[in-house]
Image (cartoon, grey):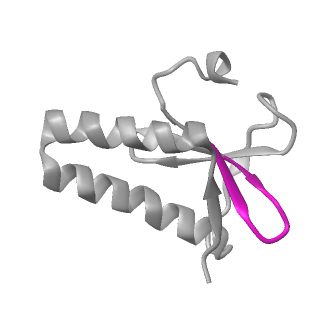
Amino acid sequence: MSKYKLSIQARDDLKEIYQYTQLNFGINQAKKYLSKITDVLNALSDKILTGRDASLFAHGLRKIEVGSHLVFYLNKENVIIVIRVLHNSMDISKHF
């Protein structure tokens, strides 16, 4: 069973991603893109995928690329905690 939790910031990030994508590419693309991110989160929590080290920004932080975004998360014992979902063109250090 997939188990992940979204921080408040990650929820806000996903809302903004959905709204931007819907506005610029349409509702179908927004749904597909959010589904793609959700699929990766499920795969992380099922241990099918693993990300890369991102502890430069915070202790224990990991990241994985999904489309044009980077998902930053902590891998706790029984749960993935998603901290942020940021566009890969952003200055990541300003968000941690």
The residue lying at 80 percent from left, 29 percent from top is 56
Number of numbered discs on residues:
0
Above or below, comparing residue 56 to residue 47 in the picture: above
Residue 57 locus on image (x, y percent): 77, 28
Residue 76 locus on image (x, y percent): 82, 60
Relative horizontal placement of residue 34, taking residue 42 as reference (left or right):
left
Q: In the picture, residue 63 is in which quadrant?
A: top right
Relative horizontal placement of residue 89, taking residue 82 as reference (left or right):
left
The residue lying at 81 percent from left, 36 percent from top is 55
- Frontmost residue, 32 versus 48: 32
Q: Is 9 a magenta residue?
A: no
- Frontmost residue, 71 versus 10: 10
Above or below, comparing residue 69 to residue 89 in the picture: below
The residue lying at 25 percent from left, 57 percent from top is 31
Residue 43 locus on image (x, y percent): 57, 70
Above or below, comparing residue 44 to residue 34 in the picture: below
The quadrant the N terminus occupies is: bottom right
Look at the image and tell me whether residue 84 can be seen: no
Outermost residue on the front side: it is 8
The quadrant the C terminus occupies is: top right
Residue stretch rendered in magenta on the structure? 73-83
- Frontmost residue, 19 versus 91: 19
Relative horizontal placement of residue 2, taking residue 62 as reference (left or right):
left
Could you tell me what secondary structure mostly forms the magenta stretch?
strand
The residue lying at 81 percent from left, 33 percent from top is 58
Residue 15 locus on image (x, y percent): 38, 41
